[in-house]
Image (cartoon, grey):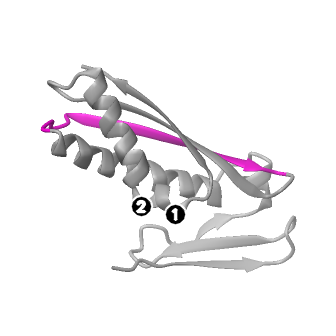
């Protein structure tokens, strides 16, 4: 299975602009630039997209791990906060905060499934960064 995305860039780093698209069409010429990445301007940037990929991948992997432990989820809500070091231009950390409503699960089973998902999620395996996790069971 493969997936693809394309990125275009025109101009220099600070005055240039780019757009990204995915083969599925979910993203279609979405703009990104220096201001969106480093100055907090409205719009997306690569780190935000990595966070979206990681949060969604983790949530699916977490659901799988809970099912393997005999628990079906009512809901999982995950936020991924990606840290970019502006000095080294390296993604240095991802912090996952996940909340789940999992009837019948206790905190120990919930945390074990969350940690197994963190280790086994394909995006977690891809990233060369410290990945931390906070898992909150909301029953």
Q: Where is residue 113 in the image (x, y as percent from the top left)?
A: 30, 38
Dot label at residue 122 = 2
Q: Is mark 1 on a helix, strand or loop?
A: helix
Badge 2 crowding class, 10 Å Cα cut-off, few under 14, some 14 to 19, many 20 or more, is some
* The C terminus sits in image quarter: top left
* Front-most of residues 59 and 38: 59
| Left or right of 7, for residue 53 | left
Residue 40 lies, with reference to residue 23, above or below; the image says above
Q: Give the range drawn in magenta.
A: 70-86
Say which quarter of the image contains residue 100.
top left
Q: Position of residue 38 (x, y in %)?
A: 79, 51
Q: Please report the residue visible at 55 percent of the width from the left and 57 percent of the height from the top.
A: 50
* Front-most of residues 54 and 106: 106
* The N terminus sits in image quarter: bottom left
Question: Mark 1 near mark 2, Cβ–Cβ under 8 Å?
Answer: yes
The mark tally for this picture is 2
Q: Please report the residue visible at 59 percent of the width from the left and 52 percent of the height from the top.
A: 48
Badge 1 crowding class, 10 Å Cα cut-off, few under 14, some 14 to 19, many 20 or more, is few
Residue 75 lies, with reference to residue 85, above or below; the image says above
| Left or right of 45, for residue 76 | left
The reply to whether the magenta stretch includes residue 75 is: yes
Q: Where is residue 110 in the image (x, y as percent from the top left)?
A: 29, 30
Q: Where is residue 66 in the image (x, y as percent from the top left)?
A: 22, 40
Residue 22 lies, with reference to residue 75, above or below; the image says below
Q: Which residue matches tag 1? A: 126
Q: Is mark 2 on a helix, strand or loop?
A: helix
| Left or right of 90, for residue 88 | right
Residue 10 lies, with reference to residue 81, above or below; the image says below
Q: Please report the residue visible at 48 percent of the width from the left and 59 percent of the height from the top.
A: 125
The reply to whether the magenta stretch includes residue 72 is: yes
């Amino acid at each position: 299975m493969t997936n693809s995305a394309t990125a275009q860039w025109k101009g220099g780093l600070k005055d240039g602009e780019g757009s990204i698209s995915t083969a599925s069409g979910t993203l279609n010429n979405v703009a990104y630039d220096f201001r969106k990445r480093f100055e907090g301007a409205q719009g997306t940037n690569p780190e935000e997209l990595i966070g979206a990929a990681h949060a969604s991948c983790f949530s699916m992997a977490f659901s799988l791990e809970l099912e393997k432990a005999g628990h079906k989820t009512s809901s999982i809500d995950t936020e991924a906060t990606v840290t970019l070091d502006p000095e080294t231009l390296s993604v240095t950390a991802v912090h996952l905060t996940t909340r789940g409503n999992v009837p019948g699960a206790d905190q120990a089973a919930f945390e074990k499934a969350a940690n197994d998902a963190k280790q086994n999620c394909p995006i977690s395996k891809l990233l060369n960064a410290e990945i931390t996790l906070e898992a909150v069971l909301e029953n």
